[in-house]
Image: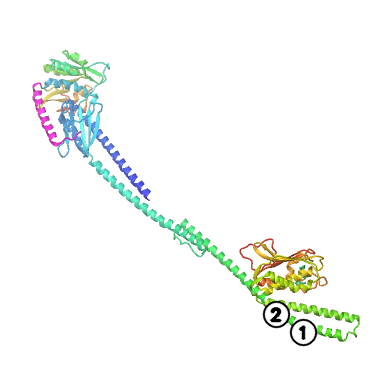
Amino acid sequence: MLVSAAALVLASGAFTAYTWLTFRAAMVEQLSVQARIIAFNSASALLFNDPVSAQKTLGALGASPSIVDAAIYDNGGGVFARYWRGRKSLIKAFPQISKSQTEAHWYTHGELSLARRIEPQGKPLGVVLIRCELGELTTRLEGYAAITAAVLAACLGAAVLISAGVHRSVSVPVIRLAETARLVSRDKNYSLRAAATGSRDELDFLIQSFNGMLEEIQQRDASLQKAHDELERRVEERTGLLHAANKELEAFSYSVSHDLRAPLRHISGFSKILAEENRDQLNADGRHYLARIEEGARNMGRLVDDLLSMGRISRQEVVRRPADLNLLWQEAWERLQPEFEGRKIEWRIGALPAAECDPGLIKLVFTNLLSNAVKYTRRRECAVIEAGQITVDGEDVIFVRDNGAGFDQKYAHKLFGVFQRLHREEDFEGAGVGLATVQRIIHKHGGRIWAEGKVECGAAFFFTLVPRKPSRPKPANSVSS
Amino acid sequence: MTRSTFPFRSLLGISAVLVLSISAVLAHASSPNEYDVKAAYLYNFGLFVQWPAAPEPDAAFTICVFGVDPFGKVLDRTLAGQSIGSQSTIPRRISNPQDALGCRILFVSSSEENNVKQFLSSLGKTAVLTVSDMPQFLDRGGMIQFMVVNNRVRFEVNLAAARRAGLTLSSQLVKLAVTVETSLPPEK
Ligand SMILES: Nc1ncnc2c1ncn2[C@@H]1O[C@H](COP(=O)(O)OP(=O)(O)O)[C@@H](O)[C@H]1O
Ligand SMILES: [Mg+2]
């Protein structure tokens, strides 16, 4: 804006100056032509000493209103003839023209004077002097200046209007668009829209496209959210159903287990009475069968007990408090001691941490894992049982490892199901409820449990007691249940 | 042009007037003779006439006086060192009308007034500019006639006579003439 105004002012200044110079040059040229004509036409008058004729010749200058006065001087310097307009001519002095010049001009306060030698065929006869006022030039120049100023003002006005128009129709919408884009990216609010310009130009098209893009994003967001919500809802629904089914199943199995106890007691009670009171009436086979019945009843009692305890644990709330895991391990170990009395076992027990947990339940975990380790190393000449803590990807992981019968890693995930067993009853007795109970306890703590094993090369069980931090990526090497 | 103060200017004016009046008085004493002026004019006429091409380019431009010479040495002085075009001017006095053929300008002296008519018609269409100060010179077939008006030497011209001789007088000259005759005198 400022630059264009300066340029305009400069241009008009240059134009005016150029006009002024051009006009002056034109004025001089015009005067020179007139002087030539006068010189030509007055030569004879000078030669024949006829001032009246010379006067007539000068009188022709009356056609030029700007010429103030004129004179013809003879060679002696005297005024031969003169012409003036309006006031009396002031011409007195003989104009000074240097020898080499035939013509000279000069400016004096608002007047231009031009002198020219009269010398036809090289014979000097005199000098003609013409004076004209520059009033016309000044008037014309003023006219030009006025026009230039008007043009300048008009141009500036137009420039201001145009720039204001550009500002209104381009800058403002662009700034608004940028502001909207900034807000959208800052607040992630895709419901914002850039204001339309109302005109049907590229800018409006840009704004429409931008808004269209926002619309698209918003729609996708909405449908994504909808799909997500739907999924969530379905998961919740299924989970709810699952929970309900689980609860039902547990309640059912609990009541069944509970109800099984009475008839079971009858079976074992009466088979005992039978064995004691009617022993003599029975032959060897009968006594054998009776013993099998008693054993079956005992197993079944244990199974019922396990199921009942698992049901109890399922319903039990986890009450966390600070506990020393070394102590819990110790207590579990002492309780199971009768089971491995007399066996040769190498214990490698590392330091276990203190943890916020339900001590009773965690002791049950240790009891179960330790009992399995002892059971499945039974055939080992030299059993090795380890326990300790390791750190995997920043997580505290507690493990129990043995060098016993092991299992096929393919079925590692199956171990934790109720009644799921990888060994035959004849090889290793058991009901398949222990690890299921352990998994429930760990899950109730928010932890995870998994197993690693190899047939005849031992097994290892790992668990954590706190939920994994969500930001942490799932480690590739760890096996989750 | 330098600007001078007012008193200085008026002083200059007064002194100029004084000088002019003194010189006028002096000039009257040795005032240029009427024939000094006429001699100069004779030469000047040569500048304002379109001459037919000279037979020989470097021949002299001859200004002749026919009859009793009223100029004397003045004419010789006036023409000395002068030229018209590329031709240098020389004076010549003739007494025989036949000699007029070699002249460019011919001044006919008043002494020849009685037989001027025959003389002029004998020139025929010869390209000679005839000048005289005798009365009725134009009426008798002459081209330029001197006269004195208000103490100034002026002249009259007869364009028809000049044209018959194949001469064209410049408008610059014609405009200075007191009267301009455009017809030939009737033949008698
Ligand atoms: N330490 C171990 N070594 C090898 N196999 C094991 C070990 N612990 C558990 N198992 C396998 O997991 C199955 C389930 O264990 P569990 O639920 O405790 O049942 P149970 O001990 O009553 O058989 C076992 O039948 C066995 O096949
Ligand atoms: Mg077990």
Q: Identify which residue is drawn at 46% across, 60% down.
A: A179
For residue A262, the mark is 1
Viewer-proximal residue among A453 and A109: A453
Task: Give the vertical position of B188 relative to A355 (above or below).
Answer: above
Q: Is A299 situated above or below A171?
A: below
Q: Position of residue A124 (x, y in %)?
A: 21, 25
Query: Judging from the image, what secondary structure is the residue with disc 1 in?
Result: helix
Numbered disc total: 2
Q: Is residue A429 magenta?
A: no
What amino acid is labelled 1 in the image?
Answer: Ala
Chain of the residue under label 1: A
Mark 2, residues whose alpha carbon is within 10 Å: few (<14), some, or many (≥20)? some
The chain letter for the residue carrying disc 2 is A
Q: Is mark 2 within 8 Å of ligand 1?
A: no
Name the N-terminal-most of marks 2 and 1.
2
Q: Which residue is mark 2?
A: A251
Left or right of A310? Residue B182 is: left
Q: Nearer the viewer, residue B188 or B58?
A: B58
Q: Nearer the viewer, mark 2 or mark 1?
A: 1
Toward which corner of the image does residue B87 lie, by quadrant? Answer: top left
User: Amino acid under label 2?
Assistant: Ala
Query: Where does residue B104 sit, x and y in percent of width and height?
Result: 21, 18
Q: Is residue A438 visible?
A: no
- The boundaries of the magenta stretch are B1-30
- In the image, B21 versus A225, the foreground residue is A225
Image position, residue B19 (x, y; %): 11, 27
Determine the residue positioned at 77% across, 84% down.
Answer: A262
Question: What colouring does the structure picture have?
Answer: rainbow
Q: Left of A395 or right of it: where is B28?
A: left
Residue B17 counted in the magenta span? yes
